[in-house]
Amino acid sequence: MMNNNTFQGARLLILDFGSQYTQLIARRVRELNVYCEIHPFNHLPEDIDSFAAVILSGSPYSVRSAEALHPDLSAIKGKKPLLAVCYGAQYLAHFGGGEVAPSNIREYGRAHLSYINPTNDPLFEGISQGSQVWMSHSDTIKQLPERGICLASTADVANAAYRIEGEDTYAIQFHPEVSHSVDGTKLLSNFLFKIAHITPNWTPDNFVEMTVANLKEQVGNEKVILGLSGGVDSTVAAVLLHKAIGNQLHCIFVNNGLLRKNEFANVLKQYEGMGLNVKGVDASERFLTALAGKTDPEEKRKTIGRVFIEVFDDEAHKITDAKWLGQGTIYPDVIESLSVKGPSATIKSHHNVGGLPDYMKLKVVEPLRMLFKDEVRRVGRTLGIDPELLGRHPFPGPGLAIRILGDITPEKVAVLQEVDAIFIDALKEEKLYDKVWQAGAILLPINSVGVMGDERTYEKVVALRAVESVDGMTADWVDLPYKFLQKVSNTIINKVKGVNRVVYDISSKPPATIEWE
């Protein structure tokens, strides 16, 4: 595991109070080439002195409730540049001699700065009156804390931003990290560079250099085994490890029988030209046998996970003296497994964080655990990985198993592979693939009546799904052209035996998930 001391440049600490936007703050900060880490408010890092500045996130909790979350700010407030966002701003006010009360109206959505303090405070440098901001709170700051100076207001929120006199402590009631706050990135950059005086030196090149050196030290002369999936994360992890330790890396690509059409052969061919030491293992029969008759989504995921570990373990035993297991774990996986209230709710259970059985006796190396998805792609470009591979849509670990609702049979997999291939190939053909974050087809456990020629049919329904997203945390359905959907639907029904109806999923995340299971 990459330790916190790996990156030697200026670092920002984000204390998480459970806001859905916390990751977004981190991504915005990193886009400004500043390294940052998210830690739960109740688990401060031991090396807090090594962080140049701190941001407090928002929270679903109220500072007025008995459940208010109390951070220990004794080593931070007044000692380091501090930006408190939403809950953070209310916390500093409420427990600093000010007053927080319920809003007369729920302050949610777009608002405009009607007042900016004319003293030219650096936080609002280059931001004009009338700038649009995004509010999301039901409490409001009625009275500023001791030594509080108002910096900005909106029509409904008198104290939209303030600072504490005599400290580099700033607080805002709106969310600069969301795109609806038009000058949000400008405000964050003002805080990072004009107030905290951080040097922006977090770049893909910098990351590669740092990580390769770190991996060499961590692994030494020992062997590493890595499970490749064909996806972006595991591929970039493999290339980084290969750059650090060369042929000490042994990659295994397992066919679980739930991959896309021809994917096993195609991906192996792709890896051939990359100099990686890859072994392909076709275990499709083993997986499909284990899944027979299982309909519960969680049970299917767990079965796939168990069989994968068994197959992987069998192959790992053939590599003598392997000491390490390489994983493509990325930062959102890490954050999802560590939240402010213990582990967050299990939305999906196939994350590869800490899921190793004791009997494997392998140490874990995770070269990407500090990166977001878009950063992984940028690092991949720096490493010279094929753009086609880097541009691949995310594909779930359990593969088509979670796109077949109900029990899984080889026949259903074959049907869905054909449908999926038609959909994905059509997206590529019409130059729509790169405009979509993730796309796929779902085989539904229902039959519907159809007419083909003069015959009545009673066959399967498939749903097509295409979403746009940045990191999968939220997603909107893509407004694909009707003509395109019509053409794809006709092709599927004409070419795939057993399907007589195609529907298009127009739900967003939340409340729906990207996958159906």
Image (tube, rainbow, N blue to C red):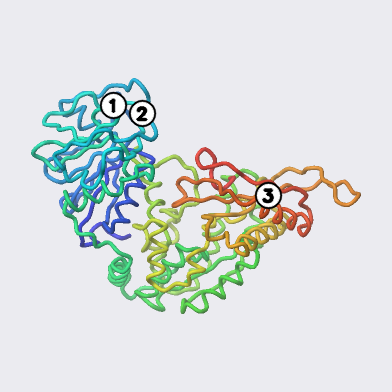
**Mark 2 nearby-residue class (10 Å; few <14, some 14–19, many ≥20):** some
Look at the numbered discs 1 and 2 and tell me whether their residues touch, using CB distance below 8 Å.
Answer: yes
Residue beneath label 2, please?
107
Is disc 2 placed on a helix, strand or loop?
A: strand
- Residue beneath disc 3: 443
How many neighbours does mark 1 have within 10 angstroms: few (below 14), some (14-19), or many (20 or more)? many
Q: Which amino acid does the dot numbered 3 rest on?
A: Leu
In x, y percent, where is residue 232? 47, 63
Instruction: Tell me the kind of residue under disc 1.
Output: Thr
Q: Amino acid at mark 2?
A: Glu
Report the Cα–Cα distance between label 3 and label 2.
Answer: 42 Å
- Find residue 140 and name its label: 1
Q: Position of residue 66 (x, y in %)?
A: 29, 24
Q: Residues within 10 Å of mark 3 (few under 14, many from 20)?
A: many
Q: Nearer the viewer, mark 3 or mark 1?
A: 1
| Pick the front one: 7 or 502 | 502
Q: Quadrant of residue 419?
A: bottom right
Q: Position of residue 65 (x, y in %)?
A: 30, 24
Specify whether residue 70 is in view.
no
Residue at the top extreme of this rendering: 104
For image coordinates 28% across by 26% down, the residue present is: 140
Mark 1 to mark 2 CA distance (whole Å)? 8 Å
- For residue 188, the mark is none
Say which of 160 and 300 sits in front: 160
Q: From the viewer's perspective, is residue 212 above or below residue 419?
A: below
Q: Image point 45% across, 59% down: which residue? A: 359
Asked whether the residues under the numbered discs 3 and 1 touch, taking CB atoms below 8 Å apart as contact, a structural biologist would say no
Query: Which part of the image, by quadrant, shows the C terminus?
Result: top right
The answer to which of 434 and 319 lies nearer the viewer is: 434
Residue beneath the point at 18% across and 25% down: 98
